[in-house]
Image (cartoon, rainbow, N blue to C red):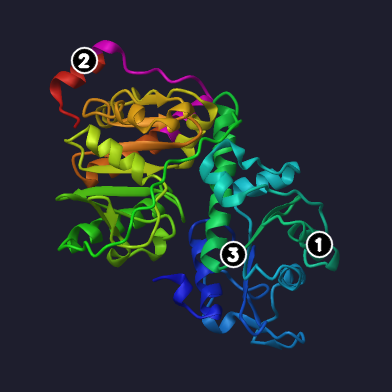
Amino acid sequence: MDIRRLSVKEQVLEAMRRVYSNALTTTSGGNISAIDEQGHIFITPSGIDKGTLTIDDIVEVLPDGTRIGRHAPSMELPFHSNIYRECKDVKAIVHAHAPAAVAYACMGIAPDSGCARVYADALGKIAGSKYALPGSLRLGDIVKQQFVLGNRCVMMDNHGATVGARDMRDALAMYETLDYLCRTLFHAKNLGGVNMIDEPIPLKTTAYPVADISADDREKREEIAAFLRRAHRGQLAGCGWGTLAVRDGEGVLFNADCDSPDDLSADDIVRYQRGKVSKAKQCRYLDLILEILRGEPQANAVFVSMPAAVMGFAVANKRFNARLIPESYLMLKDVARVPYSAMADYKSIAEVLTTSSPVAIIDNECIITIGKNVTKAFDRLEVADYSARSVIMAKAVSDIKPINDEEVKEINDTFNGW
């Protein structure tokens, strides 16, 4: 279900369902709104269980302040209405209390999105603010002022964070990405420290012409969409980031950057073939993926993504040792650490990814997994991030004790991980 196809009122309900079900806010915390072309604001109610909201619980506020609905609107209505009044490009606002974002808010620090392209592109500069009583006109003015200055992601001291965007899909993507950024920074700090990108390397993104190159690939397209939805539920891919590509005959099937996993269907999957694409949708990593598939003929699936634990290693510029348990080593082998500078030369990245080295983490950029099929590429992504979480947890107590060379040889002699 594409949230952008819903009515404005339905979008607010669906957005809160997603925010709450993804553990980005609590039963009583957070508020979401959107404004329609007539200037009517639809906002979540005050004091109502976020886990059981229905369409009748969403409150409508008319331009003259008249409120329609069976509940009072969120007490944070002042800053929502202030932003809509002053920033005409903002049509949807998400304010929530994700634990990692709240942690930054309680420290009075605005996280720096410059540690990775995925965060910088989605969030831009993240603004700080000052504490004020929730629901107060003063808080409304403080948050509004940051938006007037051009910021679209604002931390609220000792409170939470607020994002605003041109539509609800983009607002959800921003808030979700903010949560991943904050978690990534905490992980990187625990692993030794955060490294920023001094000079971002532009991605090579060819503007392929659109042509009628559809084929009978419905089953594969459905499989890709299903795995991406699954990846989103497992916090392995996000709204607007995470690309899964699969060979299909002479072509390659992939998802576009503009599609949210929650909204994805087989019809959204794009086909590339002989220098053309089936839809006018962009994928920032398509050229990189094509280079990888050319370099390893046995790879039929590629996953490029940025889950938080793995990104902790990427942003800390630390090598990830997969020699944790037999299952992690068998699936991941020795994970390659690739310098950020390699983003200027896709061939150098493709050369690293082989049947005996199916996983690479690029500093400050992403993780790439390959597989003989979709399941293998997905499983490697899942195992990598779960294993990274285990290492980060262990750091709080002691360093891990990796499997030794003799034990690794025994695994390699017994099993074929590819």
Left or right, residue 29 beside residue 392: right
Residue type highlighted by circle 2: Lys
Taking the magenta stretch, the answer to whether it contains residue 405 is yes
Where residue 67 appears, as percent x and y from the top left, is 71, 86
Give the mark nearer the N terminus: 1 vs 2.
1
Residue type highlighted by circle 3: Thr
Magenta segment boundaries in residue numbering: 388-406
Image quadrant of residue 391?
top left
Give whichever of 113, 402 is nearer the camera: 113
Vertical arrangement, residue 389 with respect to residue 166, above or below: above
Give whichever of 146, 28 is nearer the camera: 146
- The reply to whether residue 379 is visible in this rendering is no
Give the mark nearer the N terminus: 3 vs 2.
3
Where residue 17 appears, as percent x and y from the top left, is 50, 68
Regarding mark 1 in the picture, which secondary structure is present there?
helix
- Residue appearing at x 27%, y 62% in the figure: 211
Which is in the foreground here, disc 1 or disc 2? 1
Q: Residue at label 2?
A: 409
The crowd level at tag 1 (other Cα within 10 Å; few <14, some 14-19, many 20+) is: many
Image quadrant of residue 53?
bottom right
Vertical arrangement, residue 89 with respect to residue 400, above or below: below
- The reply to whether residue 277 is visible in this rendering is yes
Instruction: Work out how far the residue at label 3 is from the one at label 1, CA to CA, in angstroms.
Output: 22 Å
Q: Residue at label 3?
A: 27
The crowd level at tag 2 (other Cα within 10 Å; few <14, some 14-19, many 20+) is: few
Vertical arrangement, residue 61 with respect to residue 399, above or below: below
User: For the image shown, how many numbered marks are present on the structure?
Assistant: 3
- Residue appearing at x 45%, y 76% in the figure: 5
- Residue appearing at x 76%, y 50% in the figure: 157
Give whichever of 79, 288 is nearer the camera: 288
Q: Residue at label 1?
A: 139
